Image (cartoon, rainbow, N blue to C red):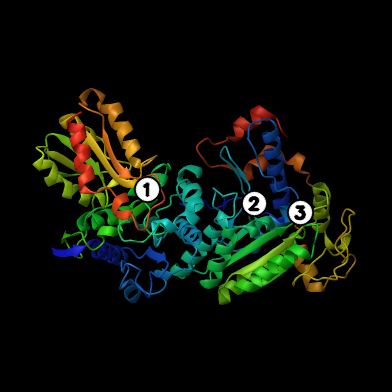
Amino acid sequence: MSQMNIIQAINDALKLEMRRNPDVVVLGEDVGKFGGVFRATAGLYDEFGDTRVIDTPLAEAGIIGASIGMAMYGLRPVPEIQFADFIYPAFDQIINELAKLRYRSGGEWTCPVTIRTPYGGGIRGGHYHSQSPEALFAHIPGLKVVIPSSPYDAKGLLLSSIRDDDPVLFMEPKRVYRAARGEVPEGEDYTIPLSSAKIIREGRHCTVLSYGAMIHTCLEAVPLCESDGYDVELIDLRTLVPWDRDTVMSSVRKTGRCVVVVEAPRTASFAGELIAEIQENCFLSLESPIGRVTGYDTPFPHTLEHLYLPDAERIRQTVTNTMTY
Amino acid sequence: MSRQSDSTQPNYSIRDAMFILRAGDTAAIHMTKRGIFSFYHSIRGKEATYCGAAFGLEPGDWMFFGPQVPQGGFLMVPTPHSLVVPTYPSPTAARLVHATGVGMAIAVKKDSRVVCVVFGEGLSDSADFHAAVNFAAVYNTPVIFLAVVTSKQHDELPAHLSHTSEAYGVPMIEVDGSDAISVMKVVSSAAQEIRRHHGPRMVVARIDAEMPPDLIFERIQQATQPLHERTRISHEVGTASADRPAPSREPGGLRGLQGTAMPADEKSERDGHNVQPETIEPEALGWEWARRCLIPTAAKPVSAKTIESDTQIN
């Protein structure tokens, strides 16, 4: 075991899988010689060459479309979209082609493509480098959506995603790319099953449900809630589609209260889907309405991002409201 | 994982293949009118382009072929040998990028296969077209972009494509899309060049849009008659020419080159593809023929039995 941040863990996973499986190729803008704008693909070009680590033109639809073709031929492409904010030109390729290929071909073809993309705010990147569009893709049948929050999970989930026969959107919380550190088995092959949530902290009073960078904000809120006398159970969803209903429902039935935390804009965020499912399945167990902490329904603000992003105090206040309803 | 065309099928001539494709197309149109299919993009009048391209490729090559029946049928181009034909073709320009991706994978695997993607010239305005050709040129991928041009302005639109090709550094070849043998030769030649030197090629197959589809098919019939019974059909290879004579509208009339003597070696080659000169009408082929190119693929497959009992097309 060695200490890694999320970038190092992702890099380790890519190296490991490319060594293990010659069909795995990486492509994207600046992923080759430069090693990626966040250095996630550093060293891959030197080890695997330009046929497996491919610098592409600046054309996201081309990157994803070409990845689909490569997957059809038998490769396992791992395209990188440099920022999730840049993914929209590839929307048609992802939604109409990548996610539908298995269905449209009656199961005759599969499309094992894992799209890596950093998402989320907190780096003062303005609205072209800060958005959280996960709900747009969670809405698309045929596409899995995975968001890790720690280095250990990032590596294990990325390996599972690449080995999955269906397309996966692997969204990386860039705000904690380097801030989140932890023990990771270097060079060791381990996987974390998709669709398995993780109970980060057990508690008795209120379930707090989140994913990605917001997990770290929730961790900041936990001691504040404790000081208010509330014992919070924190769950990291890890996979948004398909999400781990059993773990979540069991927790909410136990605590009777729930708060969902996401950084995306409030309207039609993935929090809404989680809340709807929970109230449908745990209605008789709920002691109060489910709380929601989100970003605001505005374009991502550059200078006001510290006010836009949920913080520990907002989470604490929402937990208090839920507990005292 | 991939759909291979039926390797046990008879060794068709191009002429047979065009008739089979016409039969399948006719059947699909009938089924659309009877409400069995919600819609279908007919390829009537383009049989020579599709079949010529398929015959110009080699076993193991890939061909992205457009027509799709949304309820789960797929109109498969009859091929003389085992091609890999994706059975889910996207009706949009998205499939052009997929073809480029297959070409990139072929390069990664160091295989010697070639991908041919057929598309209507209208798709060349789309962003996906430019992404596909740009990627193909940047990575020297073994892709043949076969554009079917049905414009009335014979010089204008191919010029647009030729400028695009030149800008991306992709050599362009123009051919009469109603001449199956010419299409076959051009595609075969492009594929051989690609196998030797790699790099994509653009083939522009022009079809006269004002000519009724049945007249085009009559022309196809004439083109596949034994050579001693007909005159030479158009066989132009090169870039668009501003001084090309106006097209003839007569059945069998050919753009400016009627009556030109055919070189002996070409005559011999064409005769070799005319192994069954007897007349075969699509209507006489019946479902057994149509079924060969209508392949059920998706969640609600269309079985030949269902089609037969519901429609009585024969």
* Callout 1 and callout 2 share a chain: no
- Which comes sooner in the sequence, label 2 or label 3? 2
Q: Is residue A155 left or right of residue B114?
A: left
Q: Nearer the viewer, mark 2 or mark 3?
A: 2
- Callout 1 secondary element: helix
The answer to whether A242 is drawn above or below residue B130 in the figure is: above
Q: Amino acid at mark 1?
A: Glu
Q: Residue at x 76, y 39 (%)?
A: B283
Q: Is residue B117 at least partly visible in the picture?
A: yes
- Chain letter of mark 2 equals B
Residue located beneath label 3 in the image: B276
Q: Amino acid at mark 2?
A: Pro
Instruction: Tell me the distance, in whole angstroms, between the alpha carbons under discs 2 and 3.
Output: 16 Å
Mark 1 crowdedness (10 Å alpha carbons): few <14, some 14-19, many ≥20:
many
Along the line of sight, which residue is nearer the eye, B249 or A213? A213
Q: Amino acid at mark 3?
A: Gln
Q: Quadrant of residue B301?
A: top right
- Callout 2 secondary element: loop
Q: Nearer the viewer, mark 1 or mark 3?
A: 1
C-beta proximity under 8 Å, tags 1 and 2: no
Instruction: Tell me the distance, in whole angstroms, between the alpha carbons under discs 1 and 3.
Output: 59 Å
Along the line of sight, which residue is nearer the eye, A184 or B119? A184
- Callout 3 secondary element: loop
Mark 2 crowdedness (10 Å alpha carbons): few <14, some 14-19, many ≥20:
many
Residue A18: horizontal and vertical position, in percent? 32, 65
Residue located beneath label 1 in the image: A134
The quadrant of the rendering that contains the N terminus of chain A is bottom left
- Chain letter of mark 1 equals A
Residue located beneath label 2 in the image: B78
